């Protein structure tokens, strides 16, 4: 009966190059064989599967779109497909790779000295050094311009004081990219996490992104050498440029989460018989499934177009905002619908929707909340800043 792939109704796969298709397939294989068998248990136990890091690195997924320094130098669409397949497994896996690649390796590559690049990037690509990215502070993440963490010059060093909140990979990391206020504006520092005065504590009792490490960072007179300051950027555009990269990947990731939910729900509603017919044979159910396919297709087309714009050097931050808003909202709504269509079974970790649904509650908040992205689009349309 099927002539189209239900998870790819518009044959997006045909629009990919051979290399892009091969990358997607190799990450999909890794997710199917290595991640899916353990991820529900990791979520239940509230632990990130660190045992997968070496294979993630061997596949070239860390800093995959950077050139040189042991990185794979792939294009933007390939990075998007990597995010999509990882998030088909779990948002925590994609988060790990987003933070390492877009929020830690990217700023070193874009804003670091040659010495910083040579010191850190090859080890980060190999998964031997893990990074975290400290922008958000406890008093309000949406408004990073109101940052309190500060660094003052002391001879050849800087002295860092303050705190960061909700930091992915915080207690796993050997280095933290920390954004701090200085006399000369906001600047970025590579803070080695074994420095005196640095402390990272895990945030417990999370109901979302349970297979991911989320931490608080504290800096109590941490001494950072001038050689660890990122020399090539000043101001909020430094961290916001990193966010453009990560948010771009996040437009793809939730497509994978939504596909996983729809895939399982198609099988479940075909097998389950109620009122003497398969659940999927009801019009009210098919309307819901069709709507999911419609929204996934629209998201796929948006991300592919965005990726091609990125690879042509023409991606605009407002386009990223629209795509992040649309695609995360799409996936969260679909995960909730699928959870419902699975009835009571939908509340267990035996099926994927509730895990994706809970994860996506974080994804819609981090990297700019849904409202922030709506306001970015509003500002573009009207020329009026409503923040
Ligand atoms: P605004 O006054 O508009 O701009 C300040 C400076 O930044 C420049 N800029 C950008 N540069 C690059 N990319 C962008 N997207 C940029 N947006 C603005 C701008 O040109 C200006 O530069 P200059 O040279 O003139 O000084 O900034 P604003 O203060 O009005 O802020 C606007 C707003 C609200 C959009 C921004 O503050 C924002 O995006 N807030 C949300 C913060 C956020 O997304 N935090 C995310 C933290 S990291 C995270 O969540 C990681 S989760 C990781 C995971 O696990 O996957
Ligand atoms: P707030 O900024 O306090 O926002 C609260 C509510 O107010 C939201 O609904 C928001 O949309 C709304 N709001 C804000 N401003 C306006 C306005 N002008 N008009 C209308 N409504 C508004 N940060 C990092 O730096 N590094 C990380 O690695 C990282 N990882 C994270 C991992 C997880 C699991 C989570 C949950 C968060 C992570 N974050 C990270 C932080 C994340 O970026 C912030 O949570 C996010 O930016 C929102 O900040 P906030 O939580 O302080 O909410």
Image (tube, helix red, strand yellow):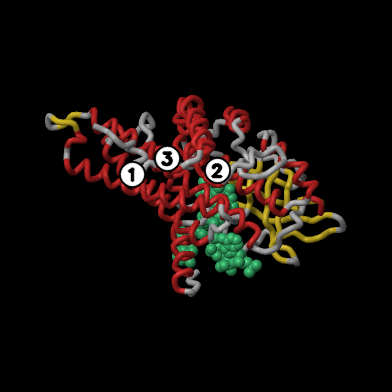
Tell me which label, 3 or 2, sits earlier in the chain.
Answer: 3
Instruction: Kindly state the secondary structure of the residue where label 3 is placed.
Output: helix
Residue 16 picture location, percent across and down = 47, 41
User: Visible in this render: residue 309?
Assistant: yes
Q: Is residue 318 above or below residue 46?
A: below
Give the residue pinned by disc 2: 79
* Residue drawn 63% across the image and 51% down it: 134
Give the residue pinned by disc 3: 14
Q: Is residue 61 left or right of residue 122?
A: left
In three-dimensional space, the C-alpha distance between marks 3 and 1, rounded to whole angstroms, equals 30 Å
User: Visible in this render: residue 141?
Assistant: no
Disc 1 crowd rating (10 Å Cα; few below 14, some 14-19, many 20+) is some
Which residue reaches farthest left?
276
Disc 2 crowd rating (10 Å Cα; few below 14, some 14-19, many 20+) is many
Residue 376 picture location, percent across and down = 48, 65
Tell me which label, 3 or 1, sits earlier in the chain.
Answer: 3
Which residue reaches farthest right?
155
* Figure quadrant of residue 65: top right
* Residue drawn 77% across the image and 42% down it: 118
Identify the mark at residue 119; answer none if there is no mark.
none
Instruction: Kindly state the secondary structure of the residue where label 2 is placed.
Output: helix
* Residue drawn 63% across the image and 62% down it: 237
Q: Is residue 350 above or below residue 192?
A: above
Instruction: Kindly state the secondary structure of the residue where label 1 is placed.
Output: helix
Q: Is residue 35 left or right of residue 299?
A: right
> Which residue is nearer to you in this view: 233 or 27?
27
Q: Is residue 231 left or right of residue 155?
A: left
């Amino acid at each position: 009966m099927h002539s189209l792939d239900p998870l790819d109704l518009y044959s997006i796969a045909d629009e990919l190059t051979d290399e892009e298709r091969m990358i997607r397939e190799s990450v999909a294989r890794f997710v199917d064989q290595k991640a899916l068998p353990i991820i529900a248990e990791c979520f239940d136990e509230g632990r990130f599967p660190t045992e997968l890091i070496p294979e993630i690195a061997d596949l070239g997924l860390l800093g995959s779109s950077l050139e040189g320094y042991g990185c794979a130098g792939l294009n933007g669409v390939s990075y998007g497909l990597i995010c999509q397949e990882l998030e088909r497994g779990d948002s925590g896996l994609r988060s790990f790779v987003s933070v390492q690649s877009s929020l830690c390796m990217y700023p070193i590559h874009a804003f670091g000295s040659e010495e910083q690049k040579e010191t850190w990037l090859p080890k980060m690509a190999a998964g031997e050094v893990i990074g975290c990215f400290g922008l958000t502070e406890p008093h309000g993440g949406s408004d990073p311009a109101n940052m309190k963490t500060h660094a003052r010059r002391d001879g050849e060093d800087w002295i860092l004081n303050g705190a960061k909140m909700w930091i992915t990979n915080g207690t796993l990391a050997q280095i933290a990219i920390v954004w701090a206020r200085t006399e000369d504006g906001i600047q970025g520092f590579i803070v080695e996490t074994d420095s005196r005065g640095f402390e990272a504590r895990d945030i417990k009792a999370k109901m979302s992104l349970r297979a991911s490490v989320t931490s608080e960072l504290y800096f109590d007179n941490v001494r950072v050498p001038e050689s660890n300051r990122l020399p090539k950027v000043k101001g909020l555009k430094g961290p916001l440029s990193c966010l453009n990269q990560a948010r771009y990947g996040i437009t793809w990731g939730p497509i994978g989460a939504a596909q996983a939910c729809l895939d399982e729900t198609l099988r479940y509603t075909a097998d389950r018989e109620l009122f003497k017919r398969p659940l999927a044979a009801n019009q009210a159910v098919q309307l819901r499934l069709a709507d999911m396919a419609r929204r996934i297709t629209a998201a796929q087309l948006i991300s592919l177009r965005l990726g091609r714009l990125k690879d042509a050097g023409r991606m605009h931050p407002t386009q990223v905002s629209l795509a992040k808003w649309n695609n995360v909202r799409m996936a969260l709504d679909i995960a909730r619908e699928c959870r419902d269509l699975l009835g009571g079974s939908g509340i267990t970790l035996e099926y994927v929707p509730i895990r994706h649904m809970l994860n996506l509650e974080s994804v819609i908040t981090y990297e700019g909340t849904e409202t922030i992205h709506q306001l970015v689009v509003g500002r573009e349309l009207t020329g009026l800043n409503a923040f």
